[in-house]
């Protein structure tokens, strides 16, 4: 089994160079950099996006990045590459149930000013975040390997990996390769997967009224519809709809879909016009039973997938990356192996409890607010108005949405 470029075994090999895997790589090379024994880190990723051209249309796949994620991306050396004309800060959220009009005083409004913050987060293209992180990773000496995983053999002293471009050795193998993680399967980790029986429909749209730097979300009874503000005045829609409704929406003509969007959003932003093709994907919950095995760890969607209605998927993955980078760096400073069992178990205990809380919360929102019809659901729906009348409760929710609660990694603390 050969190592990268004849340089000996890697300290860490990350399979998957999406935003979460690339963030881990960039953080490892910065967090452990002051130590004399600098880590050798490689990412195995079959393809990489280039930083989008300034004049290119905005992509429909975007993420809402929390304040914690912004800080992590800055620590990784990527935020300066991300922030700019293609990124939109949003200052407010308006959340309401279909039983009230969008102009009702019972609409739940979160305003960054209530928490003394300049904004609630940023809407950024996934490809922009990924490209910026990979550039930051390579800038610090990380190696990007254009290949795919084909086999894994774990021994006491390290991990041997076969790929489509040859073999590698590492002291720690990290799976950042998504919900269908090949690493998770290869190291014998299992996961519980539950279908929501919904599909998410994503597209960019132009709206008659300005988005006002506001994220708009309506619970429909058959799912959730969100309008996320984009930098050039348009919006990204994320429509989580029951499968039967989703198939009807995807089969509709452009004008029919636009009419449905306007109706289901209660015309909060006026008439709507599609700017991109509709993209859809099935929604599921995934929870790995364990996040670590001998000399292996899972981060991001390889470890957990939650409902997108709270927009926390990428944020949870970036927190995973920051937590794992921190425990590895601490171990290195104490002259421990990057794949030491003690450090991996600490990471697992830390992040598993945090992600399970968020998964349960989003599942409850989906059942009670997006789909519920019984007494408990009606109580939850009325609760939106009650929360809106309490500035103290709203501040609590805002801090949670900013990602500034719980046991935060150092990189998320600013």
Image: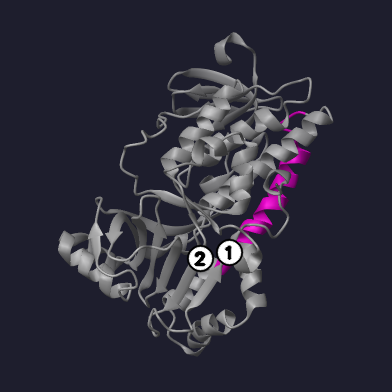
Q: Which label is found at residue 104?
A: none
Identify the secondary structure beneath mark 2.
Answer: strand
Evaluate whether residue 407 shows in this view.
yes
Identify the secondary structure beneath mark 1.
Answer: helix
340 magenta-colored: yes
Q: Position of residue 168 (x, y in %)?
A: 56, 20
Number of residue marks: 2
Q: CA distance from mark 2 to mark 1?
A: 6 Å
- The answer to whether residue 57 is left or right of residue 329 is left
- The answer to whether residue 65 is left or right of residue 55 is right
Q: Position of residue 109 (x, y in %)?
A: 51, 73
Q: Residue furthest top?
A: 6
Q: What residue range appears in magenta? A: 337-361
Q: Position of residue 45 (x, y in %)?
A: 46, 29
- Graded by Cα atoms within 10 Å as few (under 14), some (14 to 19) or many (20 or more), the crowding at tag 2 reads many
Residues 254 and 313: in front is: 254
For image coordinates 73% across by 45% down, the residue present is 410
Residues 131 and 122: in front is: 122
175 magenta-colored: no
- The reply to whether discs 2 and 1 touch (Cβ–Cβ < 8 Å) is yes
Secondary structure predominantly adopted by residues drawn in magenta: helix
User: Which residue is identified by label 2?
Assistant: 92
User: Which residue is identified by label 1?
Assistant: 112
Vertical arrangement, residue 103 with respect to residue 120, above or below: below
């Amino acid at each position: 089994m050969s190592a990268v470029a004849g340089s000996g075994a890697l300290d860490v090999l990350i399979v998957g160079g999406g935003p979460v895997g690339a963030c881990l790589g960039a953080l490892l090379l910065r967090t452990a950099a002051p130590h004399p024994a600098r880590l050798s880190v490689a990412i195995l990723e079959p393809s990489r996006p280039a930083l989008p051209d300034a004049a290119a249309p905005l992509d429909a796949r975007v993420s809402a990045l929390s304040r914690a994620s912004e800080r992590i991306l800055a620590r990784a050396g990527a935020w300066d590459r991300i922030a700019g004309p293609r990124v939109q800060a949003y200052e407010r959220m308006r959340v309401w149930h279909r039983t009230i009009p969008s102009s009702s005083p019972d609409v739940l409004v979160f305003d960054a000013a209530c928490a003394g913050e300049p904004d609630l987060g940023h809407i950024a293209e996934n490809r922009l975040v990924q490209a910026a992180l990979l550039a930051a990773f390579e800038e610090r000496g990380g190696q990007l390997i254009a290949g795919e995983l084909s086999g894994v053999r774990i021994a006491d002293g390290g991990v041997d990996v076969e790929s489509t471009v040859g073999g590698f050795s590492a002291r720690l193998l990290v799976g950042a390769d998504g919900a269908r993680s090949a690493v998770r399967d290869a190291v014998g980790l299992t996961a519980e997967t539950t279908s929501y029986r919904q599909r998410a429909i994503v597209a960019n749209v132009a709206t008659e009224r300005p988005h006002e730097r506001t994220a708009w979300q309506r619970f429909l009874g058959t799912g959730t519809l969100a309008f996320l503000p984009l930098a050039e005045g348009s919006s990204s829609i994320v429509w989580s709809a029951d499968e039967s409704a989703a198939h009807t929406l995807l089969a509709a003509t452009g004008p029919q879909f636009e009419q449905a969007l306007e109706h289901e959003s209660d015309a909060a932003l006026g008439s709507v016009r599609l700017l991109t093709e509709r993209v859809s994907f099935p929604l599921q919950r995934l929870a790995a039973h364990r996040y670590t095995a001998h000399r292996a760890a899972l981060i991001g969607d390889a470890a957990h997938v939650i409902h997108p209605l709270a927009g926390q998927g990428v944020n949870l993955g970036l927190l995973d990356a920051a937590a794992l980078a921190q425990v590895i760096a601490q171990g290195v400073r104490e002259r421990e192996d990057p794949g030491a069992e003690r450090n991996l178990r600490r990471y697992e205990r830390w992040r598993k409890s945090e992600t399970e809380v968020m998964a349960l919360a989003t599942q409850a929102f989906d059942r009670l607010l997006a789909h519920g019809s019984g007494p408990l659901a009606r109580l939850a729906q009325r609760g939106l108005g009650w929360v809106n009348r309490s500035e103290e409760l709203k501040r609590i929710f805002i801090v949670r949405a900013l990602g500034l609660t719980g046991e935060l990694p150092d990189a998320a603390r600013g």
